[in-house]
Every structure is written in structure tokens, then in C-alpha cells.
Image (cartoon, rainbow, N blue to C red):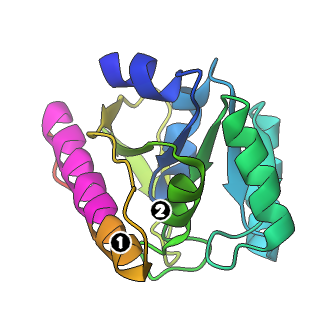
């Protein structure tokens, strides 16, 4: 849609955010987009990295919860080169649907827009993991909803907390709209 072209494929780069449990459903969204997906440096992140790289994605190891100076520099360079970075703001270990400040911090540090993306599958396997990891069933329909982008311009920690709340609200609203579009009940 329009937001995909305007924001996700923008030469200005963007910080795409999606819930950790939606990584498998999200794979087709980033097809053909110059994006890198941030995955945790933990053991869980290694599994995610292998899975995503098998699908043809570039991954960056690190954590937005504890952004190290060297990682931040690399992430900034990636965004400034016009690429998108996908982040799961409730990862790598939750709590589920609780946004950490990393995406807002990174977006503010680079002047980049945040694009919340919601997903729903008509049929899916949902793991019993903390994030209820969703694996769309073969031939299931997956609906993607792009929320209104967000720019974090205010300084100070309060601005990051406020941005986190807005990200969470827009992600939940996008997920709700995606489920409604498929005519299925919200799965959380």
C-alpha cells in the first residue's frame, strides 16, 4: 500500500516495528525491501537469525534494550544509508507486547520515522512461547496493516516513554484492523 511505498521503501530509511511473535508472518513484507532485521545476541536470537537468513534476510545482532555504542553507530549508518531496520520492541524476551525504548531511541537519534506494522493470519500455529510465536498455516491468508508513522523529535527520557506508548497503541490498533480485515478473532 501507500505507507509501504512511502515509508518502508523510502530512501530515507525507517525503523519498522512489529511484535516479536509475528516474525514468521512478517517475512513476505520485507521481500524486495532493502531492510535488515535486528535480532538478539542471545541463543533465541541465533535461531531467529538462522530462520530469517534462510528466508533471504540480512540480520543485525544486538539488542535495542541495551544499545552499545558500537551497535548504535552501525544501526545509524544502516539507517542513514537509506535502509530500513526491523525491530521487535517487545523482544527478545518480553514481556509480550511491552515496548522497550530502543526503537524510539534509535529513531530519534537518526531522525528516522517509525512504522508500526500489524499482522493477522487466517489460520496459524501459535507456539506456547512467551510471545505466542505465530506460524501461518500453509495456504493461510496473511493480512498486513501499516499504521501511521511516528517521528520522535522531543528530547529527554519522557519523550521515549511517550513514544513507546504510542508505538504500542498503533501496533495493537494495526493488529486489530488486520484481524478484522480477515474476519478472524484477535489472537491475543
Decide which of 124, 54 is in the foreground and name it. 54
Q: Are marks 1 and 2 in contact (CB under 8 Å)?
A: yes
Rendered view: 43 above or below 49: below
Viewer can see residue 77: yes
Tell me the CA gap for discs 1 and 2. Answer: 9 Å
Question: Pointer 1: what residue?
Answer: 159
Question: Pointer 2: what residue?
Answer: 104
Magenta residue span = 166-182
Which secondary structure type mostly characterizes the magenta part of the structure? helix
Viewer can see residue 133: no
- Name the spot of residue 179 as percent of width and height, x first: 21, 43
Q: Quadrant of the N terminus?
A: top left
Decide which of 34, 20 is in the foreground and name it. 34
| Residue 176: in magenta span | yes
The residue positioned 74% from the left and 52% from the top of the image is 75
- Name the spot of residue 131 as percent of width and height, x first: 48, 71
Decide which of 156, 75 is in the foreground and name it. 156
Structural crowding at the residue carrying mark 1, measured as other residues with C-alpha within 10 Å and reported as few (<14), some (14–19) or many (≥20): some
Q: Nearer the viewer, mark 1 or mark 2?
A: 1
The residue positioned 77% from the left and 66% from the top of the image is 62
- Name the spot of residue 186 as percent of width and height, x first: 20, 55
The residue positioned 50% from the left and 32% from the top of the image is 138
Q: Can you tell which quarter of the image residue 77 is in?
A: top right
Q: Can you tell which quarter of the image residue 145 is in?
A: top left
Rendered view: 20 above or below 57: below
- Name the spot of residue 144 as percent of width and height, x first: 35, 33
Amino acid at each position: 500500500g501507500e505507507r509501504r511505498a512511502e515509508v518502508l521503501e523510502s530512501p530515507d530509511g525507517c525503523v519498522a516495528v512489529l511484535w516479536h511473535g509475528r516474525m514468521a508472518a512478517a517475512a513476505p513484507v520485507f521481500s524486495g525491501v532493502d531492510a535488515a532485521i535486528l535480532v538478539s545476541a542471545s541463543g533465541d536470537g541465533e535461531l531467529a537469525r538462522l530462520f530469517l537468513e534462510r528466508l533471504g534476510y540480512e540480520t543485525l545482532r544486538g539488542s535495542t534494550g541495551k544499545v552499545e555504542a558500537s551497535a548504535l553507530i552501525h544501526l545509524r549508518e544502516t539507517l542513514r544509508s537509506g535502509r530500513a531496520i526491523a525491530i521487535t520492541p517487545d523482544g527478545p524476551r518480553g514481556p509480550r507486547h511491552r515496548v522497550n525504548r530502543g526503537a524510539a531511541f534509535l529513531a530519534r537519534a537518526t531522525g528516522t520515522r517509525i512504522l508500526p506494522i500489524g499482522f493477522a493470519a487466517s489460520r496459524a500455529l501459535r507456539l506456547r512461547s512467551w510471545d505466542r510465536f505465530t506460524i501461518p498455516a500453509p495456504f493461510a491468508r496473511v493480512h498486513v496493516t501499516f499504521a501511521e508513522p511516528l517521528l520522535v523529535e522531543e528530547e529527554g527520557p519522557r519523550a521515549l516513554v511517550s513514544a513507546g506508548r504510542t508505538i504500542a497503541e498503533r501496533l495493537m490498533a494495526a493488529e486489530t484492523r488486520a484481524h478484522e480485515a480477515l474476519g478472524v478473532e484477535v489472537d491475543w
